[in-house]
């Protein structure tokens, strides 16, 4: 039984639900995007306290915070208890994701080179000579299909690129980036994967609008897969999650051999009034 909910502000705004003996029953934390849009909420409830109203109370506290117009949850597996909770709480689906896996032992594909471009790879921090063009290339993902999500891209700079790489390295993983560089020395497209133990997780893949329709996305992904197989033979599979509405990327991944494993849903709670 919840006795009280205590708010805190560091390292981010949040709340702790406590029982009558002072035990923490669950937490909610908020991240408010600098570019605006829905605040992102992360709910954690102790397994023994689920279905007792803890999550609902914490969700209401977060939804009532100053400056919050809507709450965006984390992806939840379709058909799971978390999925049922979101529906019961009055949240609505704003994004559907299909998760897929590629078994590298079965991968033997190649891709034709695209004239006028060359492939470069780097691990961890972007090389100094490519840093500025790598920043500019991030806008390739600004128009990715996001269905009902009020997606507002955050600005990138070299410092942010390096912070992301440092976070991955600090947890013992490897960030591998593969980019297509045009004759002018500028990056036209890129794809990223984070390698952890025997698995890799695909992150962003993007091709700038003026370079699309030439087969760069497939070439980039094939070259990165082959790089992973050569440099990291312990990695047995690559995972990807793609919005159902992102038809172009789904077709590329399917052609490469990625196969569906499950679906997840992203829910949003709109603030009343």
Image (cartoon, helix red, strand yellow):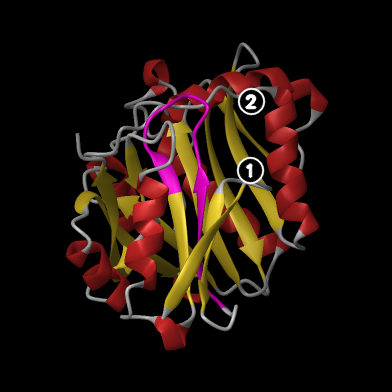
Residue 258 appears in view: no
Residue 87, above or below 266:
below
Question: Which picture quadrant has residue 156?
Answer: top right
Between 146 and 126, which is closer to the camera in this rendering?
Answer: 146
Residue occupying the point 63% across, 46% down: 9
In the image: residue 163, left or right of residue 135: right
Picture coordinates of residue 12 (x, y %)? 61, 46
For the residue labelled by badge 2, is the local secondary structure a helix, a strand or a loop? helix
Stretch of the chain drawn in magenta = 24-40
On the question of residue 155 being in view, the answer is yes
Q: Residue 7 or 209: which is nearer the viewer?
A: 7
Residue under numbered circle 2: 134
| 182 left or right of 161 in image | left
Q: Is residue 71 left or right of residue 18?
A: left
Dot placed on the residue nearer the N-terminal end, 1 or 2: 2
Please tell me in which quadrant of the rendered image residue 87 appears.
Answer: bottom left
Instruction: Report the residue at 18% width, 57% height from top.
Output: 90
Q: Are marks 1 and 2 in contact (CB under 8 Å)?
A: yes
For disc 2, the neighbor class at 10 Å (few under 14, some 14 to 19, many from 20) is: many
Where is mark 1, residue-wise?
177
At horizontal 32% and vertical 34% (from top left) the residue drawn is: 69
Q: Nearer the viewer, residue 82 or 19?
A: 19
- Secondary structure of the residue carrying numbered label 1: strand
Instruction: Indicate whether residue 26 is drawn in magenta.
Output: yes
- Which label sits on residue 67? none
Q: Is residue 91 above or below residue 146?
A: below
């Amino acid at each position: 039984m919840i006795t009280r909910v205590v708010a805190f502000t560091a390292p981010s705004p949040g709340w702790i639900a406590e029982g009558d003996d002072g035990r923490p029953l669950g937490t909610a934390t908020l991240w408010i995007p600098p570019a605006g849009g829905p605040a992102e909420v992360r709910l954690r409830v102790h397994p023994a306290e689920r279905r007792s109203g803890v999550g609902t109370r914490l969700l209401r506290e977060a939804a009532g915070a100053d400056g919050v117009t809507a709450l965006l949850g984390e992806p939840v597996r379709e058909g799971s208890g978390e999925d049922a909770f979101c529906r019961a709480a009055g949240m609505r689906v704003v994004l559907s994701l299909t998760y897929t896996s590629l078994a590298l032992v079965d991968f033997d594909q190649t891709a034709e080179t695209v004239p006028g471009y060359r492939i470069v790879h780097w691990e961890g921090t972007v090389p100094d000579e490519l840093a500025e063009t790598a920043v500019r290339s991030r806008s390739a993902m600004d128009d990715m299909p996001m269905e009902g999500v009020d997606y507002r891209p955050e600005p990138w700079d070299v410092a942010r690129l390096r912070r992301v790489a440092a976070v991955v390295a600090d947890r013992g993983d490897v960030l591998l980036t593969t980019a297509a560089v045009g004759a002018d020395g500028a990056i036209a497209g890129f794809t990223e994967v984070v390698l952890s133990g025997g698995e890799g997780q695909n992150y962003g893949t993007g091709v700038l609008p003026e370079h699309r329709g030439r087969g760069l996305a497939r070439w980039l992904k094939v070259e990165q897969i082959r790089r992973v197989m050569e440099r990291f033979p312990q990695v047995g599979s690559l995972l990807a999650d793609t919005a159902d509405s992102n038809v172009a990327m789904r077709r590329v991944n399917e052609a490469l051999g990625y196969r569906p494993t499950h679906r997840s849903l992203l829910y949003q709670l709109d603030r009343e009034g």
